[in-house]
Image (cartoon, grey):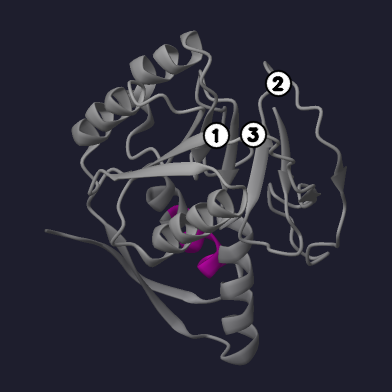
Amino acid sequence: MSTTTSAAAPTTTATSSDSTPSTETTVAVGEVDPEYPGPEKDTFILLEEPQVGEKLKFGFLAPTTSSPPVMALQIAFQEKVKEWGSEYVVLDASFDPQKQVSQFNTMLTMDVDAIAVGPIVSAALSEPLRAAKAAGIPVVSVMNPPSPEMPMLEGSYTVIAQGMDLGSYLVTKYVAEQRPGTKIGLLGTGLPVESVVYLCERMEYWVQANGLELIDRVNAKG
C-alpha cells in the first residue's frame, strides 16, 4: 500500500490502493519535522486538483456531524462539490455502526457516482463495500485505517486520514518544550471508533516518549 500525506496540511493523509493504481501526479510541497521518526515521516505530498468535466453526484456517510473535525470535513466536501457544479448527499450515522450500514445500503440506491465514508466499525461495512465495488461505485474511506502501516479496507478505492501520529507527536513535543514535566490526562471515548482509539493510543505513546507524565487515560461514557 502506498501512502501520501500533505505536508502543507499535516493533518491530512491520502493513501492509494495497490489493487487500483492511481494515475494522479503528485508534487512534494515540504518536509515533516526531521526529528519525527513515526510511520508518516515520508508520506507528505500535495495531490493535484482533480478535473471534473461533468455533473456528478457524491455521497458522504458521516460517522457523526457532532464532531468539529468531521463537520469541517463535511463543509469542505460540500463546498468543493458545489464548486464542481455537482450534487451531494450527506447522511449522519450518529456513531451508530448498524445505522451506518443501513445508510450505506440506502446510498447505493441513490444513483451516486462516488461515496466517501468515515467508518465507525470498519468490519461492519464489508458487505456494503463489496456491493459498491460490484456496482462500480468508488468508495473513499475517511480516517480508516488511521495509520499507513494498516491495510486498507477491502473494497475501498483510496483513504484519506488525518496524520494522527504526526499530530500527536507535534502536540506532545511542543508541550514538552514549553512546559517540561507536564502531567497529562487523556480523555477518550467508550465508542468503538477505530480512528479515535488509534489517536488515543498514539497520544499516550508520544506523551511518554517526549518525557511527559501520563496521569491516566479515561474513556467517556454515555
Write the residue at 35% across / 15% down: 127
**SS for tag 2?**
loop
Write the residue at 57% across / 27% down: 151
Q: CA distance from mark 1 to mark 3?
A: 6 Å
**Residue 9 appears at what percent x and percent y?**
69, 63
Classify 194 as above or below 30.
Answer: above
How many residues crowd mark 2 within 10 Å: few (<14), some (14–19), many (20+)?
Answer: few
Q: Which residue is mark 1?
A: 56
Q: Amino acid at mark 1?
A: Leu
Q: Which residue is mark 3?
A: 54
**Residue 146 appears at what percent x and percent y?**
52, 44
214 or 201: nearer the viewer? 201
As for residue 45 lying within the magenta part, the answer is no
Camera-near label (2 vs 3) is 3
How many residues crowd mark 3 within 10 Å: few (<14), some (14–19), many (20+)?
Answer: few
- Magenta stretch: dominant secondary structure: helix
Classify 214 as above or below 36.
Answer: below
Q: Amino acid at mark 3?
A: Glu
Q: Quadrant of the C terminus?
A: bottom left
> Which residues lie in the magenta part?
201-208
Q: CA distance from mark 2 to mark 3?
A: 27 Å
**SS for tag 3?**
loop
**Between discs 1 and 2, the one toward the N terminus:** 2
Q: Which residue is mark 2?
A: 18
Quick check: 194 left or right of 146? left
Q: Quadrant of residue 71?
A: bottom left
Classify 100 as above or below 132.
Answer: below
**Residue 196 appears at what percent x and percent y?**
39, 52
